[in-house]
Image: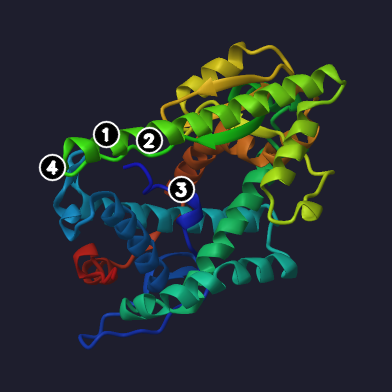
Amino acid sequence: MKGLKRIAAAVLAVAMAGSITACGQDTGWIAKSGENVLPVGTYIANMMQNYMYQYMMYGSEDVLKETVDGKTVAQAIQDDAKEDAAFSLAILKKAEEQGISLTEEEEKIAKASVSSAWENNKELYEKNGVAQSSVELVARVSALSNKLFLHTYGPNGEKEVSQDELRTKFEEKYIRAGLMIFPKPQSKTAPADATEEEKAILEETYNTNLQIARTDAQNWLAKAESMKKDGKTFQDTLFEYDKEYAQDASSVDEAKDRYVLVDRTAPNIPKEVVEELEKAELDTPKMIETEEYFIVCTKQDIKEDTASFESVRENLLGELKGEEFRADLKTYSESLNIEYNDAAISKYVPKKLKIK
């Protein structure tokens, strides 16, 4: 199931929880290996996150009855939460073996990162028996797994990914571009009882607004071409564009890099934009029309872009080695003597979760 298998959602704790049910079974923990014990709150939080994701996708609690890859969504959510518990223990153990831990500052950052989420969802978490400490542990293990990943594949790591491989991935994935975007007006369907005159007015209004957007884009294209002839860059045109539409032109930062990275694989990027940018000449203004926009743009030389490369380096590493890292963790977790709490697994199931 897409969206349900995430290392970052794995959570860990190293102290035994003390919640005992009326029948005498300890359901305060979910899994343990050696001295490392995971409190059940983190397991519940994981299932809540997965359930809410599926609920938003389907819009109904009935999503739990849907079947995916031969199992119900409810069973998949629970299986994934159990698997994440195993990954948590694997991360903890491997980090111990390699002497990796979070610094005091990293601990503070991890804790602070969930403060807003907790405040916004406190009532919901507490309805499901999840303490704030469990939510904070989600962030801590995410930080720890990231640190372990970088320790493995980053500079001087055991499986270091070379600069050349990262640059190749960077240039395959992204196009460096300058963009000015002019939205087209939204077309409106006339009511069923509208008169012919009302329909004509509606169509005329749409066409007028469409022409305004097109003319605006054409004017900026002409300005970009003119500025280029005068020795200016498209960056200079973007600066003028920002000043034109800013509430306070004096507040616009002229030193800011206005070029962006266009992800060739992003589903929200119109294919026409990628296709036109790929065949465009460098630093040559052009206009692209899509179903929703007029876009004045240029393609820039991505080989000269060091700052953007560094800003997405870790994301590139994740795309190149994320699956391998997870596969290694899975194999490693299978070598641990993990004990699961069947009483907790039976007690905390998706259908009993409160997500609203």
Residue type at mark 4 is Ala
Q: Which residue is drawn at 73% across and 25% down?
A: 224
Kind of element beneath mark 1: helix
Neighbours of disc 4 within 10 Å: few (<14), some (14-19), many (20+) = few
Q: Mark 1 points at which residue?
A: 200
| Marks 2 and 4, the one that precedes in the sequence | 4
Residue 353: x and y in percent read 25, 69
Q: Residue furthest right?
A: 231
Neighbours of disc 2 within 10 Å: few (<14), some (14-19), many (20+) = some
Residue 1: x and y in percent read 31, 42
| Marks 3 and 2, the one that precedes in the sequence | 2
The reply to whether dot 3 and dot 2 touch (C-beta < 8 Å) is no
Report the Cα–Cα distance between label 2 and label 4.
18 Å
| Marks 4 and 1, the one that precedes in the sequence | 4
Report the Cα–Cα distance between label 4 and label 1.
14 Å
Kind of element beneath mark 3: loop
Kind of element beneath mark 2: helix
Neighbours of disc 1 within 10 Å: few (<14), some (14-19), many (20+) = few
Q: Residue 206 carries which label?
A: 2
Q: Which residue is drawn at 58% across and 38% down?
A: 318
Q: Residue at x 62, y 66 (%)?
A: 110
Q: Mark 3 points at which residue?
A: 335
